[in-house]
DNA sequence: GGGATATGACCTTGGAGTAAGTTACCTCAA
DNA sequence: TTGAGGTAACTTACTCCAAGGTCATATCCC
């Protein structure tokens, strides 16, 4: 008895791996590692589950590949911006702008970076640590410059502000994803206005214990 | 043959429900809905799985009860602060202060509110919508006052800033949870310093395309 | 006896992972 | 040119297991 669809279709491994990786990035990035199903990813890529296992070993292996792809893409972009000589708020805006443009064609990559349902041990944890370090280093650097600019040298303040900054980036990207039709350029302009708004509103609060005369 | 541990232990239903709810809040709030297991929660509460199902119906029902408890606790605190007459940054700081104090004894409640692995349909989704509305309303109100203060009347700007604000709150609370030993008072002071830092650093950036002449 | 509190053992299901076989292409000897 | 053997691509049809959910029964108190 012959099986209907078995047998090679002549697609080279590298091509199939890319197809699978694309489907996996989208699945993991939208529903998260826990809820994503390998069978669904396989179907989405137009092939069957065992082929995924043959090429990526396990669900975790597939996630690892997806994560590495997404994290590398985003980290590279952030480092590119960091290599400029902008500082403080200006640098923050340029980073946001770069991220909006990089994420436009594949927005789900962002969620991949911070998936809370991803395994927290093994190779995935290691890869996560590597990229978290790489990205956090940039944020810490940027925030450090900003803190120096205003004369606050408390390291815990810097640490907390770094967390707030990264979270704000997350929020802005998420908001953007929820408002299709807004271009990266418009978003960057919006971010600029928001920073001005915050700074303007904060001035009265700064009075009681002003930093500069 | 007699079963070792069966039979009543004389604990009234209301008490048990509270025990279970406490264990559930902690479990759901720390590992999230998806990774939390009902059996583990039961064990943690010192009883067996079927009792949980007898009292709460399902894993989803148990989550719903936990969510309602946590959300009500936090929403009530935020509304209390909102009833004050503070505006702008001052109001933001008071909200943060209230949250730090409310969360001190049971920090995991915060995570409960935004669990991305919770079911996104049925009663849970409904409850989520109710509380998201209630909390977002407060944030929108506060941000609206702030925007009026600085003369920005773009509704999308307000929407985005609301998202950033809520995310910043999230980041600060998360940072705080990662730094045990820091008191709510210290955290509030830190938040104050950070706002001043941001506003100070933003001033130069405001110059190139200032909003007001 | 009856109702509330409680449990061990079971059933069920969805999804990860696997075994074993099928098809197509490529290579190289005759 | 051909065809046999090797290998890469590919699938169906399973197994296995963790975790949600249920059943039948046990104990206690009124």
Image: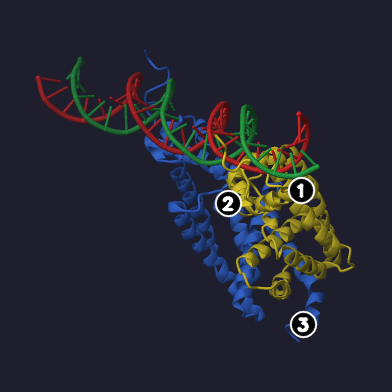
Chain colours: A blue, B yellow, C red, D green
Percent x, y of residue D11: 43, 24
Residue placed under numbered mark 1 in the picture = B14
Callout 1: SS: helix
Callout 2: SS: loop
| Residue nearest the viewer, comparing B61 with B113 | B61
Identify the residue shown where x is 59% and y is 50%: A111
- Whether residue A94 appears in this view of the structure is yes
Q: Residues within 10 Å of mark 2 (few under 14, many from 20)?
A: some
Q: Nearer the N terminus, badge 3 or badge 2?
A: 2
> Which mark identifies residue A24?
none
Percent x, y of residue A106: 57, 45
> Which mark identifies residue A209?
3
The label nearer to you, 1 versus 3, is: 1
Percent x, y of residue B62: 69, 44
Identify the residue shown where x is 73% and y is 66%: B100
Discs 3, 2 touching: Cβ within 8 Å: no
The label nearer to you, 3 versus 2, is: 2
On the picture, is B130 further left or further right than A133? right
Residue placed under numbered mark 2 in the picture = A116
């Amino acid at each position: 008895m012959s099986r209907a669809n078995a047998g090679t279709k002549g697609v080279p491994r590298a091509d199939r791996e890319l197809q699978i990786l694309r489907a996996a990035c989208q699945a993991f990035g939208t529903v998260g590692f826990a809820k994503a199903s390998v069978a669904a990813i396989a179907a989405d890529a137009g092939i069957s589950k065992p082929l995924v296992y043959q090429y990526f070993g396990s669900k975790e292996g597939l996630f690892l590949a997806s994560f590495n792809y997404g994290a590398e893409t985003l980290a590279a972009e952030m480092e590119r911006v960091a290599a400029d000589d902008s500082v403080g708020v200006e640098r923050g805006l340029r980073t946001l702008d770069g991220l909006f443009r990089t994420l436009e064609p594949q927005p789900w990559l962002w969620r991949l970076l911070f998936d809370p349902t991803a395994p927290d041990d093994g190779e995935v944890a290691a890869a996560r640590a590597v990229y978290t370090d790489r990205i956090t280093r940039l944020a810490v650097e940027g925030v450090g410059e900003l803190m120096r600019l205003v004369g606050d040298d408390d390291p815990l303040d810097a640490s907390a502000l770094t967390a707030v900054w990264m979270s704000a980036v997350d929020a802005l990207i998420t908001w953007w994803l929820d408002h299709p039709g807004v271009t990266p350029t418009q978003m960057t302009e919006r971010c600029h206005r928001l920073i001005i708004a915050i700074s303007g509103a904060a001035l009265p609060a700064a009075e009681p214990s002003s930093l500069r005369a």
